[in-house]
Amino acid sequence: MAILDEQTLDFISTSEEQTVRLGVRLGELLQVGDLICLAGELGSGKTAMARGIGRGWGAGLPVTSPSYTLVNEYPRLRDGRLLYHVDCYRLEEEAHVVTAGIEDILDDGGVIMVEWPERIDDLLPEDRLWIELRYISDTRRGLRMNAIGDRPAKLLRQFRQSAFGV
């Protein structure tokens, strides 16, 4: 694990299960209004991380990729607060974003997790935790977390302490 600076953390996950567990650690720390961006090529581990985040959030249903529906909602069991999981892989132009209602979700006040966020980057709030996942081998994935804004920086510090004890 490398702490590149206060806003950036770089590490390697050695299995899909570890990626899920790291997602759980992050999901446990999320607060309403947080934005998590999951970027990376196909097969880089975005959905495994999203599954863990949903589990840590306390969603009553397992997180699945919303590739065909664009958005899935996961209410937290203890209070009904929503985790929105947005998959922008199939969005090709800004008109599709408006049609999908993503701008409304950004204003709703839940936690938002976006796969393929680079496709709607201009519409996303500046404050975000950007997680870049990269394929290294069949079992290893590289993860780089970059916090932009005060709340995401605090979230990254909390995650670093929870996941790695530093």
Image (cartoon, grey):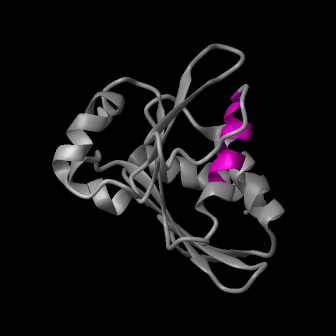
Q: Residue 81 vs residue 109: left or right?
A: right
Q: Is-magenta flag for residue 55?
A: yes
Magenta-drawn stretch, dominant element (helix, strand or loop):
helix
Residue found farthest to the bottom? 137
Q: Quadrant of residue 144?
A: bottom right
x then y, percent, for residue 67? 49, 50
Q: Is-magenta flag for residue 131?
A: no
Residue found farthest to the left? 95
Residue found farthest to the front? 68
Q: Considering only vertical position in the picture, is 64 above or below 119?
A: above
Q: How many marks can you see?
A: 0
Q: Residue 36 vs residue 105: left or right?
A: right
Residue at 75 percent across and 55 percent down: it is: 20
* Front in this rendered view, residue 57 or 126: 57
x then y, percent, for residue 1? 69, 77
* Front in this rendered view, residue 149 or 119: 119
The residue stretch that appears in magenta: 49-59
Q: Residue 60 vs residue 72: left or right?
A: right
Q: Quadrant of the C terminus?
A: bottom right
